[in-house]
Image (cartoon, rainbow, N blue to C red):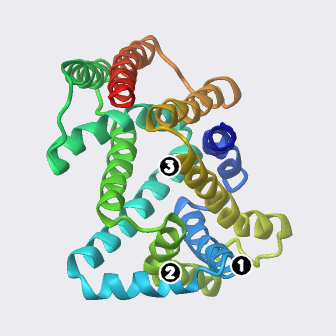
Amino acid sequence: MQNRKKGLLAALACYFIWGVLPLYWKLLEGASAYEILAHRIIWSFLFMVILLTLLRMGGIFRSTVKDLVSHRLKGALMISAAFLITANWCIFIWAVNHDHIVDSSFGYYINPLVNVFLGVLLFHERLSKLKWVSIGIALVGIIGMSVELGRFPLISVSLALTFALYGAAKKKLHINPFVSITLETLLVLPLALWYVISLYLSGTGHFLAGDMTMNWVLMGTGIVTAIPLILFSTGANNLPLNVLGFCQYLSPSLSLLLGIFLYHEPFTTVQMTGFSVIWLSLVLFTISDFREQRGKVEQ
């Protein structure tokens, strides 16, 4: 029970931080999404190196690197994971700072359903009839909203797809989460450093440009990236998957509320209908998943 309580608190804290993260990116509105992304990569890498050193995980890191180098498929999956999470971060930061928080929250609502669909395609997982119904309802909701709005919800679907594919790559790799995020940021670090240095030399960068607050907020991107990942790892190790899956809806719910009530983004009747359909599909999905997990426990 103590481990379960610890896991639940960690999971709730993780999803709460992810849910209010738009508040942090809004502090950096003066910088472009690409500059923020580059700093997020750099400072996340440095923070994770310090963390691995304090946890004395250097041996695990080195053995993981050797394993990835000796297995081409694993190496390719790690590179794919690095670029997928980089793309996901970039899309999310751009969406927040261009007043599309509502769209981003929609993306993370449909993410669990995309995960399940990829599980069928890539891992040959079997779904219950109720889960197939929930996916069908979600698809109808996305198509209906696209038709009514006259545009495809590109931001939402891109966020859901990149994060789902990232999760699929991580599932294949089975790597320690701390080591994984360190390697992912390391792989794209040269591009991030090149971009930040280019901005500095051209005089268009915001780091070391005289604004100390901006400097500290940019450096803090590493902390706000790493801490939720640590909390998520703790939650995942101490909670059943159905409880962890239910907690994840906290994050897009908080983002949705921020988008509507704090930043006054439009939330039309069409969007409300689309969200309602997705929420219905998630309720059915959660019920089905809960039944499956309970059945496994009883066996």
- Spatial distance from mark 3 to mark 2, Cα to Cα? 31 Å
* 24 up-or-down from 51: above or below: above
Residue indicated by mark 2:
60
Q: Is residue 99 left or right of residue 216?
A: left
Of the residues shown, which amino acid type is indicated by label 1? Leu
Give the number of the disc on residue 92.
3
Q: Who comes first in sequence, dot 1 or dot 2?
A: 1
Q: Quadrant of the N terminus?
A: top right
Please tell me which residue is depicted at 64% across the width and 83% down the height of the picture: 200
Location of residue 141 in the rendering, given as x and y in whole percent from the top left corner: 29, 20
- How many numbered tags mark residues here? 3
Residue indicated by mark 1:
54
Q: Who comes first in sequence, dot 1 or dot 3?
A: 1
**Label 1, residues with CA under 10 Å away: few <14, some 14-19, many ≥20:** few
Please tell me which residue is depicted at 58% across the width and 31% down the height of the picture: 250
Q: Nearer the viewer, residue 125 or 268?
A: 125
The answer to which image quadrant residue 58 occupies is: bottom right
Q: Quadrant of the C terminus?
A: top left
SS type, badge 1: helix
Q: Nearer the viewer, residue 105 or 118?
A: 118
Depth-wise, is mark 3 or mark 2 nearer the camera?
A: 2
Depth-wise, is mark 1 or mark 3 nearer the camera?
A: 1
Location of residue 60 in the rendering, given as x and y in whole percent from the top left corner: 50, 81
Of the residues shown, which amino acid type is indicated by label 3? Phe
